[in-house]
């Protein structure tokens, strides 16, 4: 199908999944307008809307407990929105510990557990198995737990989740080797809409092409980065304090690691654009809202 102008590749509004915003109306309008002109969109302008949307998956990785401390409201919202939940190995221990004081009906039960099961405590395994979690043992030592979770996700329900929006808890911010493995896995699944969630950032992989990003100053500080982790990349941007006009980013050269979203005019949505000739890791700092 021919178009008069190239369509933006993806519209990103990841903070819309985390909490309602007082500025939701203008952002929702901007998101809807951009989504109409895009091939893919990642946002949730109205959590109660019944309109069709891409499936949502929630993956919890096995990390230190503090890296899963996003605040009860955020976790409850994500868990409620998710069409499928997966815990990687020892992450089941963390979920069980976090919910131990809650009534049984309020405790979170992942739909699936996977990994080589070397970290999960036997009591946690039996607890969730008895509550209905399916267990898929993957003994491979050549794949990271995150990769195992994504492989399982894509095999479920006849491939229903092949283009899901995937939130990953405990993805970066702890051990450097774990974070590097997470980013490596992210690069191998560019077809999925993956949002890495840490205590202070959201991060997504921007594939080669054009991207529109909605910034919510009620939930995000505006401090952001474009990281060329996967090789040299020519980039053009708008809406940043320090824009690029066909500049080259490289890990051994210029790296836009601490940029800033430029404030929008009063009453206007904050919209940033990125046109990249290679993959980039986009990060945005979250305001401390108990995330």
Image: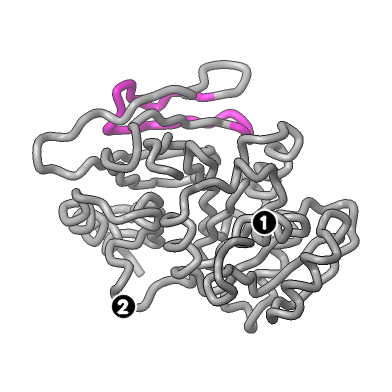
Give the residue at x 84% y 54%: 119
As measured in the structure, the alpha-carbon distance from the residue carrying label 2 to the one carrying label 1 is 36 Å
The image quadrant of residue 161 is bottom right
Mark 2 vs mark 1, foreground winner is: 1
Residue picked out by circle 2: 51
Q: What element carries label 2?
A: loop
Q: Which of 130 and 275 is in front in this view?
A: 130
**Residue 93: image location, x then y, percent:** 73, 57
Q: In this view, does 108 lie to the left or right of 88?
A: left
Give the residue at x 65% y 45%: 65
| Disc 2 to disc 1: CB gap under 8 Å | no
Is residue 242 something one can see in this rendering?
A: yes
Using the image, determine if residue 90 lies above or below residue 261. Answer: below
Using the image, determine if residue 47 lies above or below residue 60. Answer: below
Give the residue at x 30% y 73%: 48
* Upstream in sequence: badge 2 or badge 1: 2
Q: How many numbered markers are drawn?
A: 2
The image quadrant of residue 251 is top right
**Residue 271: image location, x then y, percent:** 26, 42
Quarter of the figure with the C terminus = top left
**Residue 27: image location, x then y, percent:** 22, 52
Using the image, determine if residue 74 lies above or below residue 123. Answer: above
Q: In this view, does 145 lie to the left or right of 158?
A: right
Q: Which mark is residue 45?
A: none
Start and end of the magenta stretch? Answer: 229-249
Residue 94 magenta: no
The image quadrant of residue 181 is top right
Residue picked out by circle 1: 97
Q: Which of 47 and 250 is in front in this view?
A: 47
């Amino acid at each position: 199908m021919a178009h008069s102008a190239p369509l933006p590749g993806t519209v990103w509004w990841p903070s819309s999944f985390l909490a309602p915003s007082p500025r939701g109306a203008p952002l929702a309008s901007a998101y809807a307008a951009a989504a109409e002109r895009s091939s893919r969109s990642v946002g949730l302008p109205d959590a109660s809307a019944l309109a069709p949307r891409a499936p949502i998956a929630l993956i919890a990785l096995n990390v230190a407990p503090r890296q899963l401390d996003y605040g009860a409201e955020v976790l409850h919202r994500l868990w409620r929105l998710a069409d499928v939940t997966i815990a990687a190995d020892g992450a089941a221990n963390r979920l069980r510990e976090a919910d131990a004081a809650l009534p049984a009906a309020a405790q979170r039960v992942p739909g699936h557990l996977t990994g080589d099961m070397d970290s999960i405590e036997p009591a946690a395994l039996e607890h969730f198995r008895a509550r209905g979690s399916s267990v898929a043992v993957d003994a491979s030592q050549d794949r990271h737990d995150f990769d195992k979770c994504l492989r399982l996700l894509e095999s479920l329900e006849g491939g229903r989740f092949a283009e899901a929006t995937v939130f990953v808890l405990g993805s970066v911010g702890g051990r450097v080797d774990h974070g590097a493995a997470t980013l490596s896995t992210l690069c191998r699944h560019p077809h999925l809409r993956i949002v890495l969630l840490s205590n202070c950032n959201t991060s997504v992989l921007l594939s080669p092409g054009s991207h529109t990003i909605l910034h919510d100053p009620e939930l995000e500080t505006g401090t952001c980065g474009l990281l060329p982790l996967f090789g040299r990349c020519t980039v053009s941007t708008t809406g940043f304090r320090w824009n690029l006009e066909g500049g080259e980013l490289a890990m051994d050269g210029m790296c836009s690691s601490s940029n800033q979203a430029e404030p929008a005019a009063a009453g206007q949505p904050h919209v940033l654009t990125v046109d990249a000739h290679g993959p980039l890791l986009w990060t945005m700092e979250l305001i401390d809202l108990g995330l």
